[in-house]
Image: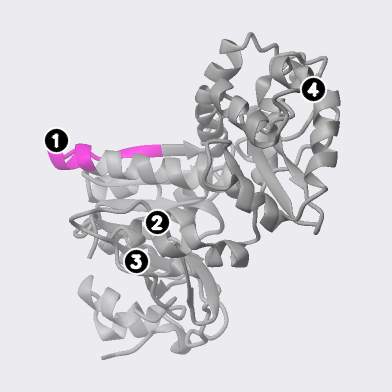
Amino acid sequence: MGVLEGVRIVEIAGIGPGPFCGMLLADLGAEVVTVERPEGSASRPRPSAIFNRGKRSIVLDLKAPGAVDAVLRLVEDADALIEGMRPGVMERLGLGPEVCLARNPRLVYGRMTGWGQHGPLSQAAGHDSNYTGLAGALWFASPPDQPQHAPPTMLGDIGGGALYLALGIVSGVLRARADGRGQVVDAAIVDGVAHMMNLLFSMYASRGGDFARKQSSDLAHWAGRSYRCADGGWVNIASLEPQFYAELVHRLGLDGDERFVRGQWDPKLWPELSEHLTKLFATRTRAQWCELLEGTDVCFAPVLDPLESAGHPHMAARGVYSTVDGVLQAAPAPRFSVTPSAPPGQVPPRGAHTQEVLRAAGLTQAQIDLLCPDDSRGTRN
């Protein structure tokens, strides 16, 4: 069920953006088989492993005799493979692109890394903020002379990594179905993050932005920031365009204040205006500001935690969040009118599908018994 029904993906289990990409494709209807390492009890529930929802799980020790051949049998019938190892690891295992494409010439081989498959840093460890810092995006995440912070995993791992890999895989599969030729997708987080900033660069340049002077950017403008309310809650204002800024000034009753009327593009006034707004928003609760500004063209939103977001009327009306086995999670996105995605389901136990997947790939029961520990073979039914 879903727009990608009929697309088969083999995922070599890893951490972070690779599994998230697999979840996204599974959410959209692809059949994703994740190859996991032997680790702990195979039958133990793991509802918090949301990135494995919608997938089928098998357990294999890729260093064990016969395991690589078992994966290659899965590859023969797959449209794509996802891996997130450091460059060279898959080659050393015997599952590199050349080997897999020789077995299946139409395979799209998706490689997820932070730094990319080549370059001076390609073998170094890293995390989201390292990649976004190097790519130039984290620089935008604070006012001048303040430490840079961004929501963990969102900008790099997910935005610049998993989503670009998913697009690359779907694009590669479309091409392979047209001409029968597979290829390697090198999805580096630093590449994706840099690419995402093209819209930001355009906005920045249109205002004569100087990267040496962050305060000259309207994107660091006082009107594009959050303010603390009387009850300790926060609201966010992003009235950047002139018509939205005029709406903000009007609704806040500041039409008669010449500083606000002429101050939108005057950086010299921004500190003074920001201080005024800081004091103003501290005079009412978040709920009171929502009553006045939410749903208007001010470009306004309350800053909510995930549980508050789930209960917000707009998010609830769209059914964005649900709770599965006690774990809050978001519904598949985007939405399709003809081939809708299934709602979030349970996360399979590790190795729950080992038996059925390997049998379907042509392995005998004796081969499966040799490959898999007793507690990771899944059901024989």
Whole-percent x and y of residue 272?
86, 25
Q: Residue at x 53, y 79 (%)?
A: 46
- 98, above or below 374, in the image: above
Q: Quadrant of residue 4?
A: bottom left
Q: Residue at x 27, y 85 (%)?
A: 365
Residue corresponding to mark 2: 24
In the rendered structure, which amino acid carries the disc numbered 4? Answer: Trp
In the rendered structure, which amino acid carries the disc numbered 3? Answer: Val
Whole-percent x and y of residue 310?
54, 65
Q: Is residue 150 left or right of residue 154?
A: right
Q: Residue at x 80, y 30 (%)?
A: 274
Q: In terms of sequence position, does the residue under pointer 4 or pointer 2 come before the other? A: 2
**Disc 3: CA contacts within 10 A as few (<14), some (14-19) or many (>=20):** many
Total marks shown come to: 4
Closest to the camera, between mark 4 and mark 1, is: 4
- 74, above or below 91, in the image: below
Proximity of marks 3 and 1: CB atoms separated by less than 8 Å: no
